[in-house]
Image (tube, rainbow, N blue to C red):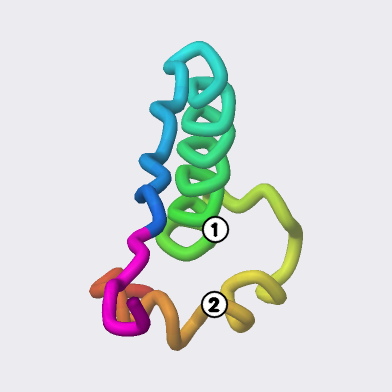
Amino acid sequence: MMNEAVLDPIALPSPLPVRELMPWAIFGGLIMLLAIYFVGAEEGATSLVPGMYVHEFVHDGRHLLGFPCH
C-alpha cells in the first residue's frame, strides 16, 4: 500500500577507543596551555619573544579574558 511508511534502521555511532583519543586530547591540551601563556603571561620578565609584538597582538584578548596588563 502507498500509505505504509518504510523506516530505515538507525545507524548508531561507534564508540571511540581511549587509545586513539588520548594523543589528540594531550595535543589539544598543550596547544591550549600555549595559547593561555601567550595571552596571559607573554610580557616582561617571562617573555619568550623579544619586543612587544605578541603583547600588542593579544592585547584586547587579554582584557577580554580578565588578564591585567597595564
Q: Residue at x 65, y 70 (%)?
A: 54
Residue in front for this viewpoint, 58 or 6: 6
- Asked if the magenta segment contains residue 13, the reply would be no
70 left or right, relative to 36: left
Q: Is residue 47 above or below residue 4?
A: above
Q: Nearer the viewer, residue 13 or 64?
A: 13
- For this orientation, the residue located farthest to the bottom is 60
SS assignment at label 2: loop
Residue 23 pos. (x, y %): 57, 22
Seen from the viewer's position, the closer of residues 14 and 27 is 14
Does residue 39 lie above or below 13 as drawn?
Answer: below
Residues at discs 2 and 1 in contact (Cβ within 8 Å): yes
Going 28% across and 73% down the picture, which residue do you hit?
Answer: 4
Among all residues in the image, which is located at the extreme front? Answer: 1
Main SS of the magenta part reads loop
**Residue span colored magenta:** 1-7
Q: Earlier in the sequence, mark 2 or mark 1?
A: 1
**Helix, strand or loop status at disc 1:** helix
Position of the C terminus, as image quadrant, is bottom left
